[in-house]
Amino acid sequence: MKKRKLRVLASSIAAVSSIAASAIALTSCGGNNVTVPDITEKGTVVILATGGTIAGSGEAGKETGYKPGSISVESLIASVPGIEEIAPLHAQQVCNINSDDVTSKVWIQLAKTINAYAEDPDVAGFVVMHGTDTMEETAYFLNLAVKTKKPVVITGSMRPATSISADGPMNLYQSVVVAANPESEGKGVMGVFSDSIYSARSMQKVSTFDVTAIAAGPMGALGFVRNKEVFYYEESIKKHTYNSEFVIAPDDKIKQLPDVAIVYFAADADPSIIDWAKAHSKGLVVAGAGAGEFSEKFIKKLNGVVSDNYPVVISSRIDSGVITQDSVLVKKAVAANDLPAQKAAILLRLALSKGYTEQNKLIELFKQY
Ligand code: ASP
């Protein structure tokens, strides 16, 4: 097969030197003005790099003690043998940061960028390179904010690029395979990690170090990747991408999402943290014990803050199962369904950005998305 040329947006090429790479990319990270170049090769996969361990650099061979978001997208792609044979690639360095530093400004910039490229008929799909720590949040946000049936894949790695047996190159290769495959269309944003494909809604980080750290608990994988082949078995039935009401168009004026606080309940937890949350946010997600349960003093405090102007969503600190509305102990609060707190917060922030604060409307949204 013919060798294809990789094009990298000139203005955003980060230097190979780790320090310089971060400094250059960070200047435009989370910026609001999105302009994308015209893509001229049919079937192009656009790779948007944001940093993370996949772009991490450290002591040669070591798995720990590295700096995430150090290596440019150009160098990372160049380290994957045969990737240019899958599809024409167009790379853009959106940021080069640790994913723990990702903000709603970065999410919005990513959604706008994808929506702008998606209008180009020569673009076949997208791969977002991202740190694994908050990958599930960015995936779920994009699942609700991008409007396209073109495949959008998110990936990263658990080992830095400079470690022995780095997992980034294979994850990137497999992500491009998935993004270039027409069977991936209309499935919403998907995570590709260690041979498996996950829905953005179900994927979660489940280990602090394992190379299979991105998984989907009881929902499992949508499918698998082997070499250049994609095998699908499942699909998410929840609303996303092309039928989401939270799409953020490239010219949308929104700069960031309203703040939502997350409070984690534990035995004997002091409920006064809820007063602080109320004073510093537009809404609250509480991760309860078991099926969204709390101490009497927590329930009393939550009943005191919840209203149609200050919504409270009840999720669980347990990673498996569902919270039903009739089991919610704070009667004016909303069940997060099966969403973990960090994803429930994203749906609540998007709902608040549309002015939805009323309990019944939020209950409906948490069932649909
Ligand atoms: N701290 C890193 C990040 O999320 C971890 C990783 O990518 O695996 O950016």
Image (tube, helix red, strand yellow):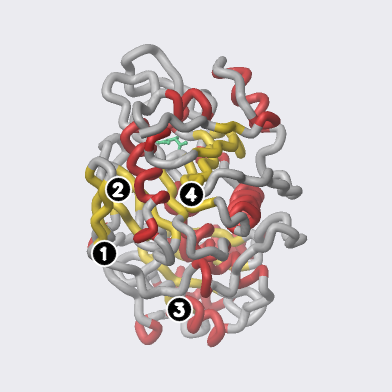
Q: Which mark is residue 219?
A: 1
Q: Which mark is residue 206?
A: 2
Q: Amino acid at mark 2?
A: Val
State the SS at label 4.
loop
State the SS at label 1.
helix
Q: Taking the image as drawn, is residue 270 in sight?
A: no
- Disc 2 vs disc 3: which is toward the camera? 3
Location of the N terminus (image quadrant): top left
- Disc 4 vs disc 2: which is toward the camera? 4
Q: Looking at this rendering, what residue extends furthest in the front direction?
A: 2
Disc 2 crowd, CA 10 A, few/some/many (<14, 14-19, 20+): some
Residue that carries the numbered disc 3 in the rendered image: 368
Q: Work out whether 232 lies above or below 312.
A: above
State the SS at label 3.
helix
Q: Which of the marked residues, 2 or 1, is nearer the chain's N terminus?
A: 2
Residue that carries the numbered disc 4 in the rendered image: 43
Q: Amino acid at mark 4?
A: Gly
- Separation of marks 1 and 4 at Cα, in angstroms: 31 Å
Q: Quadrant of residue 340?
A: bottom left
- Separation of marks 4 and 2 at Cα, in angstroms: 34 Å
Q: Is mark 4 within 8 Å of ligand 1?
A: no
